[in-house]
């Protein structure tokens, strides 16, 4: 089975040029922040535009809001931070690229270079799986080639594939065995690799109207991304057979979603179609659109003076964290917070637990983090979640700082794809 697909590109912000030095960048950011409070509106607007041109690399250099900061500076900085967060998120969902120029490079060095250039952990698991672990010499000639097609080419050269059930985070390389080559079987869209893996046809002999065709599609993503959810609206799915006839979607109002499974950077989506006539031998085209919900850059919120804290609100980019209360709960201290996103989409739906992995710690006088014992949900709405954390500490609570980390934005992106020439059973 051959799958042909044009590489889909995304229109995103270009990455900023790297600053000459951290000191120069910091000085320039400080100068522009001061200009945000200039007497003339044109100067304030110019400073805000210049900060945006510096790109997401300056996010850590932007000052946090203080009581001495004017309302306009605080508002402009919040706007700049939110736009730069979006730029950073857009950059993250572009495919990583690989550049290598070597006609005789050991496999181990190729995989090491792929991991280093893309930020995607790649582990050679052959020895752990009891397989021979040869280190063949490969041709590795890539000039800014997107990660997935480049990796497929390397794995085919070495007779390898990826093991989808690896326990560790990242990609796990194993011997291919009876599996067919990877090149030509998949479609690539942004950081995703989409491949049809099975087709199941069903006819009910007692009820001729009860018939179905299920197309299983494996969607893999670069593991550097932290995925919240991945879905396919069936209204966005179209297909035709090899005679040009349209294949009807079985549940056009439905949405297919597969839950995220631990650290595995792949899920399988089952797309229900209506069974075509027996004369059809292949699905000529199958088009869809992945809806990916991805967290943006992680922001850190610090709260001191916990003994007197009451509804202390802090906002960064598109998220607001409120420390509602700190109270004694038997032998533990209970820290109650609310996390509100400007737009969370379905990211906070009750079946999604990603937000409960956000780090929440007490930081003691020695600077070392103390993890919570347990937590419970206190409130849940479309864009907001309340959580109570319990900490066991033997010192006065005012000696600690509560530190909470969460993405500053929730990014919803769509990735169209097209698969071709899928053989029917």
Image: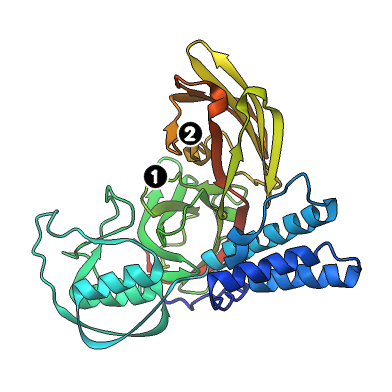
* 316, 386: nearer the viewer: 316
Q: Which mark is residue 365?
A: 2
The CA distance from mark 2 to mark 1 is 38 Å
Q: Secondary structure beneath disc 2?
A: loop
Q: Which residue appears at 35% of the width and 77% of the height?
A: 150
- In percent of width and height, residue 25 lies at 60, 71
- In percent of width and height, residue 275 lies at 46, 56
Asked if one can make out residue 391 in the rendered structure from this viewpoint, the answer is: yes
Q: Which residue appears at 68% of the width and 52% of the height?
A: 317
Left or right position of 114 against 275: left
Residue 4 position by quadrant:
bottom left
Left or right position of 112 against 223: left
Left or right position of 89 against 189: right
Residue 195 position by quadrant:
bottom left
Q: Nearer the viewer, mark 2 or mark 1?
A: 2
Asked if one can make out residue 348 in the rendered structure from this viewpoint, the answer is: no
| Labels 2 & 1 near each other (Cβ < 8 A) | no
* Quadrant for the N terminus in the image: bottom left
């Amino acid at each position: 089975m051959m799958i042909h697909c044009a590489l889909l590109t995304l229109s995103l912000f270009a990455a900023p040029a790297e600053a000459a030095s951290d000191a120069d960048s910091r000085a320039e950011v400080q100068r522009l922040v001061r200009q945000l409070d200039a007497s003339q509106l044109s100067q304030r607007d110019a400073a805000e535009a210049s900060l945006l041109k510096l790109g997401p690399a300056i996010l850590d250099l932007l000052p946090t809001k203080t009581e001495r900061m004017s309302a306009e500076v605080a508002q402009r900085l919040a706007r700049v931070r939110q736009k730069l967060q979006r730029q950073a998120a857009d950059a993250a969902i572009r495919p990583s690229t690989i550049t290598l120029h070597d006609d005789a490079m050991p496999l181990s060095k190729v995989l090491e270079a792929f991991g280093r250039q893309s930020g995607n952990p790649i582990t050679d698991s052959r020895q752990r799986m009891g397989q021979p672990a040869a280190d063949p010499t490969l041709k590795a000639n890539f000039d800014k080639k997107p990660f997935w097609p480049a990796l497929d080419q390397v794995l085919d050269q070495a007779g390898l594939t990826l093991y989808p059930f690896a326990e560790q985070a990242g990609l796990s390389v194993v011997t291919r065995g009876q599996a067919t080559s990877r090149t030509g079987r998949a479609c690539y869209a942004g950081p995703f690799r989409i491949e049809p893996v099975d087709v199941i046809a069903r006819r009910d002999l007692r009820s001729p109207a009860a018939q179905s065709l299920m197309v299983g599609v494996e969607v893999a993503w670069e593991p550097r991304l932290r995925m919240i959810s991945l879905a396919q609206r069936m209204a966005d799915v179209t297909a035709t057979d090899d005679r040009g006839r349209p294949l009807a979607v079985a549940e056009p109002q439905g949405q297919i979603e597969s839950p995220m499974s631990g650290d595995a950077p792949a899920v399988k989506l089952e797309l229900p179609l209506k069974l075509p006539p027996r004369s059809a031998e292949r699905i000529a085209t199958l088009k869809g659109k992945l809806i990916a919900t991805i967290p943006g850059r992680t922001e850190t919120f610090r709260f001191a003076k916990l003994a007197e804290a009451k509804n202390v609100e802090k906002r960064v980019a598109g998220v607001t964290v409120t420390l509602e209360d700190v109270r004694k709960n038997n032998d533990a201290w209970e820290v109650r917070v609310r996390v509100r996103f400007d737009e969370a989409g379905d990211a906070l739906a009750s079946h999604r637990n990603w937000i409960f992995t956000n780090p929440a710690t007490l930081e003691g006088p020695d600077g070392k983090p103390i993890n919570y014992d347990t937590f419970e949900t206190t409130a849940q709405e479309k864009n907001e979640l309340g959580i109570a954390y319990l900490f066991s500490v033997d010192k006065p609570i005012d000696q600690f700082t509560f530190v909470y980390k969460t993405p500053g934005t929730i990014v919803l992106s769509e990735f169209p794809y097209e698969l071709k020439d899928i053989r029917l059973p």
